[in-house]
Amino acid sequence: MTNPVRIAATHDALRKKLLFLFLNCLLVFMVMLLIVLQGQKIYSIKNNIRHSATTADHINSLLTKQFTNATRKLGRRPEILSSALQKEPAPGKALLAELAAVRDILAAAFVYVMNKEGLVTASSTSDDIILQGNNYRFRPYFSNAMAGHSYCYAALGVTTNKRGLYFSSPIRDNQETVVGVVVIKSGMEQLSAILTDNTPRISFLLSDTDIVFATSNGYDQWLFHAGRPLPAREKEKLIQSRQFGNEPLSDLPFDLTEDDVQLDNTSYRVAVTPIDLPGWHVYTLEKKQPVYPTVLTVLFLSIVLGYLLTINFISKNTERQLTAKMVKEIEQRKNTEKSLIQARDEAESANKAKGDFLANMSHEIRTPMNGIMGMTNLLLNSELSREQRQQLQIVDSSTTRLLDVINSILDFSKIEAGKLQLEAIPFSLEEKINELFFLMAPQADSQKVELRSYLAPDIPEKLIGDPTRLMQILTNLVNNGLKFTQVGSVSLIIHLEEIQDGHCTLYFAVKDTGIGIAREEQDRVFESFTQADTSHTRKYGGTGLGLTISSQLCRLMGGKLHLISEKNKGTTFWFISHFKLPEQDSVAMKQTKEIVSNRRSPFQDAVILLAEDETVNLLLAKALLEKKGITIVSAANGREAVECFKKESFDAILMDIQMPELDGYQATKAIRDHEKLTGGHIPIIAMTAHAIQGDRQKCLDAGMDDYISKPLHPETMYQVIKDQLAAKPSS
């Protein structure tokens, strides 16, 4: 008999091991979370510092190249020297014209000349303010320039009460004696533009006394505020100097000397960079990035990995316990038969429990996944910085890929548990195939693999079945073909096998020209988590569940998935599936059967040239037109369309507007010019995404006969083509 004490001890040891495994997983992912969050913080800080330094470089370039150098060169002009030597203002027209030209070129507010007494002897201003005769010897920019130094001084103008940077330079005579000062006052527009270019960050320019002198647009309320708490004595001295007019120089509601500040209930990181003006700095504030997307992603990964490790641990421990128990029972009880039966029953129960647990847990995992993906999409549609958008796009892409894997596991577990039920709803097979090829076309185009389809014309327009599971099978097979095909094509072939008693049987085949499957490996491709060659898993990826699920879905739909392949010569997967037909009266059914092989489209004999450079648009238009029996010749650009027109005969041309080589307008003109020499008139129909008012008339004025806007509406397109073909003169 089994010892209850021993069983309890075994279970207790197992619980301890599981707890230890869980705690280890939790510890590892807590460390990972801390590393990710710290890395995000370091990246954000460095990025903010880089943007602050870039802004400072632009300001330095403006101050040095545009104003400081210009002031020095202007101070060496003979006309400026002559004006500085005058005791009273008496500027000539030539001098005033030169000052005005300098002001216009530099986009400056004022340019003026002062004699050694500080009297303005000549000036040019942007708003007709007269400075001549005013004395500004009390300004530091005058005293510093008279001392022989170029100087830059920020202040509110005494006369204009407007902010500006005063760039001064000494005027020297032939003996290098300073006899006056030339001054250029810049407006704040260029500085504000540089600071605003750093959006969405907030930028401040602080003077050498830490007073905010310029800001990004929209933050002018912080002008003339102290970026740090100023001692009362220092503040009083600045107010008395009237450098900033009558401003009270109040403190900002935050301290820019801190690494982090709060503004409008939002946290910002602060970066500071000095500029070439001594003591002046650029401060940049960047919003702290939210951490919850990172936390959610790492938390989800920890749950998934912990779940997988736990399942693996339980499975291995269960197998070891069963084996040990059977051996021990054989040795102790010599009851081999009873022990084997008991072990078999326990193993089957464990496998069933594992399958049920996998199915339920896969479903439970998908619920928070949908929440994560939904919130991520909401965030992507909100206002984000470039870095935040890139991070969220990575989260969105990763969760989408992970959800695909989870869906495959869920489908597999549902099928194994017998819980998957097929729907029976009406659908159009042609529409579903068009949707499938629309989704697969970008992948095929990127691989330079041709994607083909053939849908037999006698297939009923409407079927009753499970379109979702049918498309799942075809998507898996087409995707599998694209994955293992580097050169050539992947073809989808569908034809009618039988119609009888309100049911129809269809044959489906997906054929590729890829690497093929060796005969000895073909039996393994339908096994779970298996690929024909294990090296393919490393090279091509995949879970190995796609063909397994497709095969089991085929069985549920009354068919079987077959394989025909040869190594290096491609592969064909095919199956038969059964569908119900919508109810209709017996007369209509009889008529349908009589004409199913003889019906003919009114466009059957039409040959149309389709000029379109976008692969997806080309495939869609071609599929819609060929459905009506129209023969399509395609051209990838306007020049190729003109050459095709000259070489072949067509009933009409569908012309895209934006194409390389020649656009739609240029190609139409070339065709109409050719017709002037050869005679005739071919209908040209514009097919373009331009749909604003006036575009239709523009196309007609260019020589086109009609206009179709994108996205294409099949019935509208058919009617326009039909009208143009009917209006075309007989040959």
Image (cartoon, grey):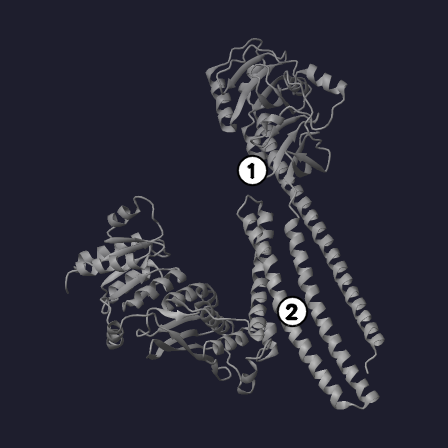
**Does residue 379 sit above or below 205 in this rendering?**
below
Q: Quadrant of residue 534?
A: bottom right
**Quarter that holds the N terminus:** bottom right
Residue found farthest to the left:
730
Q: Is residue 582 above or below residue 195?
A: below
Which marked residue is nearer to the observer: mark 2 or mark 1? 2
Q: Nearer the viewer, residue 372 or 463?
A: 463
Three-letter code, disc 2: Phe
Q: Is residue 87 visible?
A: yes
Say above or below: 37 vs 133. Answer: below
Q: Position of residue 516 (x, y in %)?
A: 50, 80
Residue drawn 69% across and 82% down? Answer: 345
Query: Pointer 2: what residue?
Result: 357
How many numbered marks does the figure carry? Answer: 2
Check disc 1: other Cα within 10 Å, few if <14, some if 14-19, many if 20+: some
Q: CA distance from mark 2 to mark 1?
A: 56 Å
The residue at the point 60 percent across, 38 percent down is 201
Residue 274 appears in the figure: no
Which of pointers 2 and 1 lies earlier in the amino acid sequence?
1
Residue 566, placed above or below residue 255? below
**Left or right of residue 235, residue 156 in this image:** left
Q: Position of residue 81 (x, y in %)?
A: 57, 18
Q: Is residue 81 left or right of residue 7?
A: left
Q: Amino acid at mark 1?
A: Asp
CB within 8 Å, label 2 to label 1: no
**Residue found at x 63% / y 41%:** 51
Q: Nearer the viewer, residue 634 or 535?
A: 535
Find numbered disc 2 in the image and state the secondary structure of the residue it sits on: helix
For mark 1, give the secondary structure.
loop
Look at mark 1 in the image and give the residue it sits on. 197
Q: Please tell me the numbered disc located at residue 154.
A: none
